[in-house]
Every structure is written in structure tokens, then in C-alpha cells.
Image (cartoon, rainbow, N blue to C red):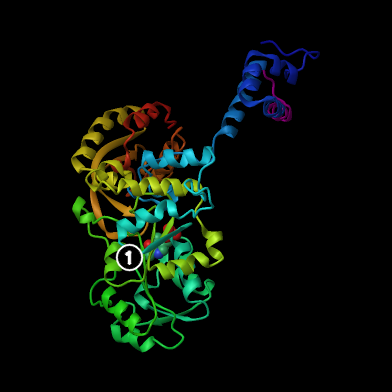
Amino acid sequence: MTKPTRASSPLPSVDSVLRGTEGIRLIARHGRTATLAAVRLVLAELRHAKGSASVDTVAAAAAARLESASLQSLRPVFNLTGTVLHTNLGRAPVAPEAAAAAAGALAAAVNVEYELESGERGERDHHVEADLKDLTGAEAATVVNNNAAAVFLILNTLALRREVPVSRGELIEIGGSFRMPDIMARAGCRLVEIGTTNRTHLRDFAAAVTPRTAMLMKVHPSNYAIQGFTAAVGDAELAKLAHEHGVPYVVDLGSGTLVDLARFGLPHEPTPQAALAAGADLVSFSGDKLLGGPQAGIVVGRAELVRRLNRNPLKRALRLDKARLAALAATLKLYADPDRLAERLPTLRLLCRPVLEIEALGRRLLPRLAKALAGKAEAVLEETRSQIGSGSLPVDRLESRALSIRPIGPRKSAGKSLEALATAFRRLPIPVVGRRQDGALKLDLRCLEDEEGFLSQLDRLAL
Ligand SMILES: *Cc1c(COP(=O)(O)O)cnc(C)c1O
């Protein structure tokens, strides 16, 4: 055993690390400032720990530090949670055409508010308004940041300091902080609760209308269902009552699909076109739920009311940026060809994916996964049910298949091993996010389309 001599330091100098082969490579990749800082940090830590190290060891530690610092915080993941429109995972994956349109709009000057024919100032919503009108049969349309913003803008524009009766069965909370009563208060209007949780009748609405009533409103109970002894009032009756009193009838649809999902073998979900046809004056819905586009809030309906929304100074604060506008426009174009929509719109494709296809995928993946689990955990392919998510079709589930992975080892530490297993999958270069259930990590394969991408990183699973 050789002891380091007193004269030579156990640590290399900063300079010698920077001049080494790896040091030069790191400077080329990350820049001199970041590399210097990383090398200094590594050396300071070693000095503190009274350690010794070679130039190569210090450079390797600095490289690891620089790599993890340069990782984007926001990055693609495999959503194998079984919730197709997962709000925490960014909801709808948009079509390639929409992603390309957004990237193009970000990277260059675009005519977002410019009329190319006349050379005059234009309206940004015009890029989507014509298609929204065609698709829904509305007189006019406007778009904002998200559906919460759409509801807020409608309430603030049409009902400031006035009353809005809403059924007690519809006072929803949508994950996080969208609570109808709070939105109403912030928008400056007074919520008048009517009916009961399970039953609300037309006469309840009729009795609630006063000279201070600004509008009648229906909120689609998108993330729950009231079942059993229930009653709710239909759009046509509410619209008629509203119009008898000279106030608008507004529907917050939440998800709102532009096509009848039954056509694709999915459960029926109300459409904006049906609400408008039944007499609604304004209908609001999200861009990134069943519509399959970017985050946006869409309002369609009567031209005079849409004009009022656009004149509210808040519209400026809530408007869409050019990237999402471009993505939304490209998504709407896909609806012009409903026959191929289920192939081209990722959300619909994933929701319609045949269970036999998912099963076949699972069978292909299983042996490769078992090998990567290296005796530390075992996997089986099992039946599961996916959900649509984001407050769409809350009750209906879609038959699917999941890889169910269970740690091998003493029962006592099973919880901890499961946690470690889930963490290992989340630490892959493209993090794999599954769902923990019944002591296993379940990877619902419905949303796994990049099979090679998934397989190619399995050998990096650190169990
Ligand atoms: C989802 C939803 C909202 C909120 O929409 P965001 O696009 O998430 O802002 C509002 N109302 C209903 C009924 C919803 O389902």
C-alpha cells in the first residue's frame, strides 16, 4: 500500500482537470463558466471530506453534475397511469400537425394579428373562429387561456354585480382550485344556489329569477355523476325560461367534444352543437380535453354576446398566445375529415385503441420487461380499465391491459420495495409514470405508442 507523500496534494488542481481530455470535452459541451463551477464544487466537496481523487475521477464527477443540471425540468414522459387525459401530465397529446404548427409559430414572425390581404391589423381569434363556427353551428366564437378563464370571462362580462342561479347538483370542483362558487365570487357575481344536490326542477329556476338575475347557467358535472333519485332540467327548458325573462342561457360543458363519440364506440358526451341547437346562447369548453388540442378555453354562441366578451378588458389578460392558437387551428382542421379523425387525433386514437392491440403489445413487452426486472420483481399482463380523465365521462371505463409489476422479497418491506420500483421507473431517461394499486405498480399500456422508445431504456432500470 502506498501512502500519498506529504508533498503531493491528494487532489488535482482546477487547471489540470480543465486541461484534461474530459475537461476539454465538458467545456465544449457546457461552456467554460459552468464547467469551472462544477469542477470547483466537486473539489470543494472532496476537500471537505478529506478525500483524494485523480483528474479523471474529478472530471467524471463534474460531468455527472453538469448532465443532471442540464436536464430539462419539463420533459416528455410515458403516461402509463391509465388516465388518458391526465391533467398533471399535460392532458391531450396534440397531433403532429398541431405540434409542428406551434413550433413554427414560436420560431418565426407570424400574422397572429395581421391581415395579409389588406395589410391591416387583424384579430387573433379569426384564425380559429371560422372553423369553430362551422363545427358547432354557432354565430361566433372566441378563445382564451383555458375553460376556467372562459367561465370567468363570461360571468364577469354578463353578470358583474348581478345574480346567477345554479343548481346545487352542479356546484363542481375540478381538481386543484377550480370551484364554481369561488370563480363566481371572483368574477364579481352572486351565486344563487337552487334545488337540492340530487334534484333540481324547472320551478326552482323559475322561482329564483329576479330583476337582478343576469343569466341562467348549467354546469356539466363532468367529473362525477349523481345517480339514483335524480332530476335535472334540460337545456331546452332552461333556455326557454331564460329567454322568457330576457336573460341569456349559458352552458359550461367542460369537456365538450366536437364529434359524437358514440360514432367511435365511446360513451356519449354532450356536444356544444347540441347545447346551441337546444337554445343555449353561449357554450364554453376546454381545448385540451376530448377536443384533443392545446390548453385553451373556447366559447361559442351568439355574436352579440361574444362581442361583449371580446370587449371586456380582461379578454386581453386571458387571451391565447400564438403557439397555442396555431396548434388549436391545426387541430380543428383535422375535424374537417371525421372519417380519419380516430387515426389522426391522438386523444381519440388512444381512447379508441382496440383492446386486442393493447394485449398484443403487452405480450411483446412482457419477456423483455421480465428480463430487465432481473429477479428483483415479477411482472404479469392483466386486465385493467383505463379512464378518460380530466373530468370527461367520469363513470365509463375502457377495457385495457396493464403490466402489473410486484417486488419480490419479504412482505414486511413490500411497501418500500414498491416505492423503490416506482421511483426507478420514474428515473428512466423518459420517465415512466404508472399507477400503484393493490401492492403492485401497474403500467396501463393504452397510451404506450412508442414501443421501441420504451423498450430501449429498460436496460437502464436501476433496481
Ligand atoms: C375542466 C372543466 C373546467 C375547467 O377547464 P380548464 O380547461 O381545465 O380550465 C370547467 N368546467 C367544467 C365543467 C370542466 O369540466
Residue 290 falls in image quadrant: bottom left
Number of labelled discs? 1
Query: Does residue 46 show up magenta in the picture?
Result: yes
- Which one is nearer the viewer's eye here, 306 or 27? 306
Q: Where is residue 425 shown, x and y percent of the image?
A: 41, 37
Quadrant occupied by the N terminus: top right
Is residue 62 shown to the viewer in this render? yes
Find out if the beta carbon at label 1 lies less than 8 Å from the nearest ligand 1 atom.
no
The picture quadrant for ligand 1 comes to bottom left
Q: Is residue 83 above or below residue 270?
A: above
Q: Is residue 215 above or below residue 370?
A: below
Q: Is residue 24 above or below residue 457?
A: above
- Which one is nearer the viewer's eye here, 171 or 421? 171
- Which one is nearer the viewer's eye here, 166 or 197? 166
- Which one is nearer the viewer's eye here, 105 or 448? 105
Quadrant occupied by the C terminus: top left
Residue 241 falls in image quadrant: bottom left
Q: Residue furthest right?
A: 7
Residue at x-position 40% and y-position 61%: 141
Q: Residue under label 1, please give it.
A: 224
Question: On the rendered structure, is 356 left or right of 413?
Answer: left
The amino acid sitting under disc 1 is Tyr
Q: Which residues are magenta?
A: 41-54
Element at badge 1? loop
Residue 304 falls in image quadrant: bottom left
Q: Where is residue 116 shown, x and y percent of the image?
A: 48, 46
Q: Where is residue 111 shown, x and y percent of the image?
A: 50, 45
Is residue 436 shown to the viewer in this render? no
Q: Where is residue 368 shown, x and y percent of the image?
A: 30, 28
Q: Residue furthest front?
A: 118
Residue at x-position 68% and y-position 29%: 34
| Circle 1 crowding by C-alpha within 10 Å: few under 14, some 14–19, many from 20 | some
